[in-house]
Amino acid sequence: MPWAEGSAVTNGKLVLGLGCERRTAPEEVIGLAEQALADAGASGSDLALIASLDARSEELAIHAVAQHFAVPIRFFDAATLEAEADRLQNPSEIVFAHTGCHGVAEGAALAGAGPDAVLIVPKIRSARATAALAGVVCNGVACGQRGVE
C-alpha cells in the first residue's frame, strides 16, 4: 500500500528521520543519511520517506536528501513527535527546550513508520545534523528489505 498524507508508511520500507541546524549544508545531511543507511545495511532503494519536524520544512538540506533519494518528505508538528517520546532511545531535554519534543530524528522516523515500527538505526550525528532510521522488523530484518515480506 503506498504512502498517503495522514497515514504511516505501510509498504515495509524504511523511514529516515532527520534533524538539522538552520542552513546546514545539504552535502552534510546527505552524507549523514548515507551513513545511517550503511549502518542498517540498507540502500536508498529501501527508503519510503524522509521525515522531520515541521519547523524544518524550509530547510534546503532536508529537501536535498529527499531529492537525492527520490522519496517524499513528511513534516510533523512537535506534539506528534513528542507522542513518540517513550519509544526514543536518545531523548534530550535540550532538544525539548528548543523544539517541544524530546527527539527530532528518532521521533520523526518512528512517527513516519507507524506504531509497529522500531528504531533500526538510533540517532547518529554529524556536526550540524542528526539522522535515525525506523521500520517494521520481520525475522530480525526490516520488512521489505532484502526480499523479506
Image (cartoon, rainbow, N blue to C red):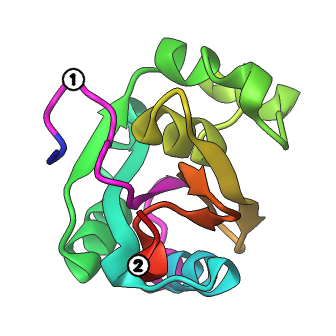
Question: Would you name the residue on which mark 1 appears?
Answer: 6
Q: Earlier in the sequence, mark 2 or mark 1?
A: 1
Position of the C terminus by quadrant: bottom left
Location of residue 96 (image quadrant): top right
Answer left or right for 125 relative to 137: right
Specify the amino acid type for callout 2.
Answer: Gly
Q: Position of residue 73 (x, y in %)?
A: 25, 51
Q: CA distance from mark 2 to mark 1?
A: 27 Å
Q: Is 28 or 9 nearer to us in this picture?
A: 9
Question: Would you name the residue on which mark 2 appears?
Answer: 147
Which residue occupies 37% across, 81% down?
A: 44
Specify the segment rendered in magenta: 4-30
Which residue occupies 58% across, 78% down?
A: 32
Q: Position of residue 13 (x, y in %)?
A: 38, 61
Q: Is 113 or 124 nearer to us in this picture?
A: 113
Disc 1: CA contacts within 10 A as few (<14), some (14-19) or many (>=20): few
Which residue occupies 60% across, 54% down?
A: 137
